[in-house]
Amino acid sequence: MKLFLLKIVMVLSFFAFISCEEVSKPEPVAKPQVSQKPYKAGVVLSFDDAYVDEWFDANQILKKYGWKASFCVCRIDSIGTPQIQKLLEMQKEGHEIAGHGYHHYNAIKYVAANGINEYMKQEIDPMLASMNRLSFNVSSFAYPYGQRSDSIDKALSSKFNIIRGRAFRCDTPETEGCYFRGGKYMYAFGIDDNHVHFSMSYLLELLDYTKKNNKILILCGHKPVKNVTENYQTKIETLEFICDYMKLNDLQFYTLSDLYTMMSAN
């Protein structure tokens, strides 16, 4: 009798475990999946601010990998004509030119002091107007400083297909929030050399986890350089390491806008 009761408890525990696993899924899939792997494992490389010359130089080095990146540009009306031409050339090659704010305001602080309407008027609307005038196909936005809130996300939702912040725990790869989860709101893991959370060994762990679990890893940097001399610089060596890993392990390059295309196709 005791053995019979024990078997019943084990069966009930099994189904309870399955139920908990399904409830904890971050975003339930609305349509039935035709495959257990709806997309190929890969990486989104994104860059913030306006380091156009350095982005262009990095592009010349990394072309041999067939790479793609999302360049999230701020202060578009302060960029020189040669730099605008470089951005247009990279867009033509298949890279994404995305938005990063007209003035590079911290959204949380600015909205707290001035309100959401003023934020849209000063930071978002003029950015979109200028970038559209310059023939940039902007559909993604990365928050300056990576800081966001649900209310600001909601206000930006009708303007952009993809909205990206930054977040990192530097604990274990499975606890990071830097993977594509099927929705338009996402976070990136920073690969600038000065960040205290960054190391090449942990980056390798993230890439391994991405490959083994069929994820899309979202990364962000700022200014690509050969030798780091100040904050917000990403080593070219780091970018080549990522590209080498992706080539050896058959991972795919994605842009932020590619993720929306995949969502729309499902």
Image (spheres, rainbow, N blue to C red):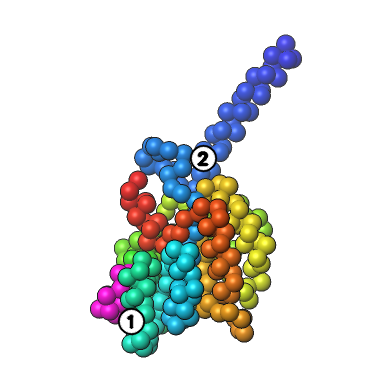
Residue 23, label in figure: 2
Residue 255, label in figure: none
What SS does tag 2 mark?
Answer: helix
| Relative to 266, residue 108 above or below | below
Inter-mark Cα distance, 2 to 1: 49 Å
In depth, the one of 256 and 9 nearer the eye is 256
In depth, the one of 258 and 17 nearer the eye is 258
The residue depicted at 53 percent of the width and 58 percent of the height is 246
Q: Is residue 181 in sight in this rendering?
A: yes
- Residue 136 in the magenta stretch? The answer is yes
Q: Which residues are magenta?
A: 130-138
Q: Locate residue 33, reporting x and y percent.
A: 40, 38
On the image, numbered disc 1 is attached to which residue?
85
The residue depicted at 60 percent of the width and 33 percent of the height is 17
Q: Residues within 10 Å of mark 1 (few under 14, many from 20)?
A: few
Question: Does label 2 or label 1 sit earlier along the sequence?
Answer: 2
Q: Quadrant of the N terminus?
A: top right
The residue depicted at 44 percent of the width and 83 percent of the height is 53
Q: Is residue 195 left or right of residue 253?
A: right
Q: Locate residue 131, reporting x and y percent.
A: 30, 77
Instruction: Name the residue type under label 1.
Output: Gln
Q: Residues within 10 Å of mark 2 (few under 14, many from 20)?
A: few
Instruction: Name the residue type under label 2.
Output: Val
| Relative to 1, residue 31 above or below | below
Q: Locate residue 262, reporting x and y percent.
A: 37, 52
| Relative to 114, residue 212 above or below | above
Q: Locate residue 242, reporting x and y percent.
A: 56, 63
What SS does tag 1 mark?
Answer: helix
State yes or no: discs 2 and 1 in contact (Cβ < 8 Å).
no
